[in-house]
Amino acid sequence: MEKKCNDVHCSVHGSLSLRGRTFTGTVISTKMQKTAIVQWEFKRYLPKFERYEKRKSKVKVHNPECLNVKKGDIVEISECRPLSKTKHFVIVKKVGEDVLFEEKQALLEEGKTRSKKKEPEKQEAEV
C-alpha cells in the first residue's frame, strides 16, 4: 500500500522531523495539491452548566504522495515545522476509513440548505 516517494516533506521517506502534538481525525477535503483538511471532535467542559459541549477542530495538513489519502479516511497527524503559511501538520499514517462519512456530510448539507419559510408554505398547499 505504501510506495516510495520523492517528497521532501514526507515523514517516512523525507527528512522532515516531527515534534509536538499528535491527533487522529477524518479527512474532509483533498482539493488542494499535496494538502488535506483534517477535522476531529473533542469535548469541552462548561462549569456554569456542569455539562460538556462538542467542539470541532480543523487543520490543513501535508498529504504525502506515498500515503495518498482520500476524503473520508481516518488518519493520524503530527505537528512539524511550518511548511507554509497555514500548514503545520503532516499525515503520518492512514488508520482506516469512516464508513458513514458520506451520509454525515449529506445530512449536514441538508440542514444548511433547509429554510423555515418553505415548510409553512408546504403545509398550506396540502390543506
Image (cartoon, rainbow, N blue to C red):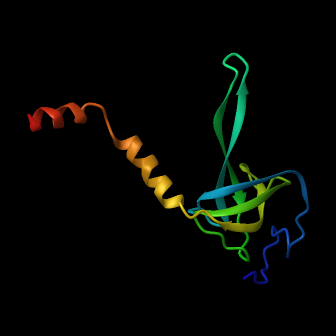
Q: Position of residue 8 (x, y in %)?
A: 82, 71
Q: Residue at x 53, y 60 (%)?
A: 100
Location of residue 31 by image quarter: bottom right
Instruction: Answer left or right for 119 relative to 48.
Output: left
Q: Quadrant of the C terminus?
A: top left
Instruction: State the image coordinates of residue 27 (x, y, percent, origin top left).
Output: 63, 59
Q: Residue 21: horizontal and vertical position, in percent?
A: 85, 49
Q: Nearer the viewer, residue 126 or 76?
A: 126
**Which residue is farthest top?**
48
Q: Residue at x 36, y 43 (%)?
A: 113
Residue 80 placement: quadrant: bottom right
**Residue 53 placement, left or right of 104:** right
Q: How many marks?
A: 0
Q: Position of residue 16 (x, y in %)?
A: 88, 65
Vertically, is 28 above or below 9?
above
Taking the image as shown, residue 4 lies to the left or right of residue 113, namely right
Front-most of 29 and 15? 29
Q: Residue at x 73, y 70 (%)?
A: 64
Looking at the image, which is closer to me, 75 or 36? 75
Question: In the rendered view, does 74 fall on the left or right side of 122?
Answer: right
Quadrant where the N terminus sits is: bottom right
* Image: 34 above or below 56: below
Please tell me in which quadrant of the rendered image residue 34 appears. bottom right
Above or below for 45 versus 112:
above
User: What's the residue at 75%, 81% (across, down)?
Assistant: 2
Viewer-proximal residue among 72 and 15: 72
